[in-house]
Every structure is written in C-alpha cells, then in structure tokens.
Image (cartoon, rainbow, N blue to C red):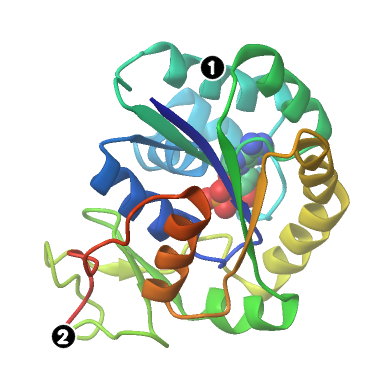
Amino acid sequence: MRKYVIMGVPGSGKSSQASWLARDLDLVHISVGDIFRWNVQQHTKMGADVRRIMAGGELVGDDLAEKVTAQRLAEHDWNYGFIVDGFPRNARQAEFFLESYDIDAVIHLDLPDAEVRRRVLARRLCSGCGLDYNLIEGRPRVEGKCDVCGGTLVTREDDTEEALVVRLRDYHEKTDPVLAIFARKEYVLHIDATKDKDEVQQAIREALGLPASKPDPSAQP
Ligand code: AMP
C-alpha cells in the first residue's frame, strides 16, 4: 500500500505526474480540483457554489474541501494506495489530513513562479475526456481538438493572468506552510519540475525508491 500527496504551484505538472504514477502503480488518483470541476460541469449544487470562487483563482472553503476529500477517500477503492493531488492547501487542511491518514511521502514539484505563467497560459483541457494539453510541449494533431476523444480543447476558467496572480499568492501564503508542516515529519521529496515530463517522472520514481518507468503511454505524438 502506497499513500502519497503531490504538491506544487499551478502548472508544475501535478496532475500529469500523479496520473502517470497512479496508472503504473494501480493507485487511485484523487484530484480535489477535478472533483470540483466535475461538479461545475455537471451543474450540481456544489458546482454552483464553487464556480465563481474557482474562476477567480480563490480557494474554496476548508469545510467543503475537507468533506470532498474525506468522502472520496472513504470510498476505499484504493486497494494499492492513493495519490492525493490538490489537498492539503493550507495549515488547517494539513492538520485535518494528518489526523485522519498516514502517508508515505509528499512529492513536491518545485517550479519557479517565472516559469508558471508561461506554462499555465499555454494549458488547455479537453472538455470531453479531461486530458491536459500544453501547447508549448505538444500541440494536438488537429488544432483545438483532443487527439484521444476528439473533444474540444478549452482553457480552464482559472488559467487567466488575473486568477493566476491570486493562485500564486495563495500558494505562497497558505500552501508553503503545509510543506513546512510535512517537512517536520520528514515526508517531503523535492523534485525539480523545470525538466521535461519524463525526466520529472523518473526523478519522482528515483526519490521514492521505485524502478524507472516506461515512456508515458498517454504522451502525445
Ligand atoms: P487545482 O486543479 O488543484 O488547481 O484546483 C482548482 C481549484 O479548485 C483551486 O483553485 C481551488 O479553487 C479549488 N481547490 C482545489 N483543491 C482545493 C483545496 N484543497 N482547498 C480549497 N480549494 C481547493
């Protein structure tokens, strides 16, 4: 059983690195942001409550974020473990998490703010299957269409210059202290996220003492 948390500024590659690791190790990838985005897309009551907060780049309330995470983990479909992405985001959430779960490692993807802007503004998301694209690293074969499902590629509502300023500010003010909390328990593995996607994945595996991975099967040609 492996239990990991993955952290990093917006655009540091958390989601793709976590999915890759999860796929190979049979872990359940729990992305709190994805759960909220799904609720927005499906027009649920929760979606209506969080939509504007998310679009502005703000964090949703701790009670809700904790509830969503706890409910997802309570499904106990993670026979081989989990990798949590996007939680905890502040000291309160970190305490909540540590009271409820023991974890093996926190993977911290380290990326300077200067690089964040370039990456985030080039990010697109498939509105059909949710696959992430980055127009710097790999364009889709047909512009604006997903290579896998043909869905339309869209920009996340919070991938704007204005929302990015808020997200980065929040990250440094609220999420940096989470790293300090975890670091006191010696959980944190710092990974240089400026490298390309494959190198970052190999560095994660090495830090976790896992064998090297095969090339990412979901990589865009
Ligand atoms: P992400 O995909 O992780 O960047 O999350 C997208 C958005 O979902 C964030 O900007 C927040 O509005 C919200 N969100 C995700 N995780 C949390 C969390 N742990 N606490 C509060 N808000 C969150």
Q: CA distance from mark 2 to mark 1?
A: 39 Å
Report which quarter residue 182 is drawn in: top right
For mark 2, give the secondary structure: loop
Label 2 or label 1, whichever comes before in sequence order: 1
Residue 30 in sight from this viewpoint: yes
Q: Report x, y in % for residue 27.
A: 32, 35
Residue 52 in sight from this viewpoint: no
Relative depth, front residue between 173 and 164? 173
Residue drawn where x is 38% and y is 27% of the image: 81
Q: Report x, y in % for residue 191.
A: 60, 64
Residue drawn where x is 22% and y is 81% of the image: 140
Contact? badges 2 and 1 (CB < 8 Å): no
Q: Which amino acid is tagged 1?
A: Ala
Relative depth, front residue between 108 and 219? 108
Q: Report x, y in % for residue 141.
A: 16, 85
Q: Report x, y in % for residue 185.
A: 77, 33
Residue underneath mark 2: 141
Is 32 placed above or below 158 here? Answer: above
What numbered label is drawn on residue 166? none
Q: Which mark's residue is nearer the viewer, 2 or 1?
A: 1
For mark 1, give the secondary structure: helix
Relative depth, front residue between 168 and 217? 217
Relative depth, front residue between 78 and 185? 185
Is 188 placed above or below 192 here? Answer: above
Quarter of the C terminus within the rendering: bottom left
Badge 1: few (under 14), some or many (20 or more) residues near its Cα, within 10 Å? some
Is 43 placed above or below 117 here? Answer: above
What numbered label is drawn on residue 70? 1
Q: Is residue 107 left or right of residue 47?
A: right
Q: Quadrant of ligand 1?
A: top right
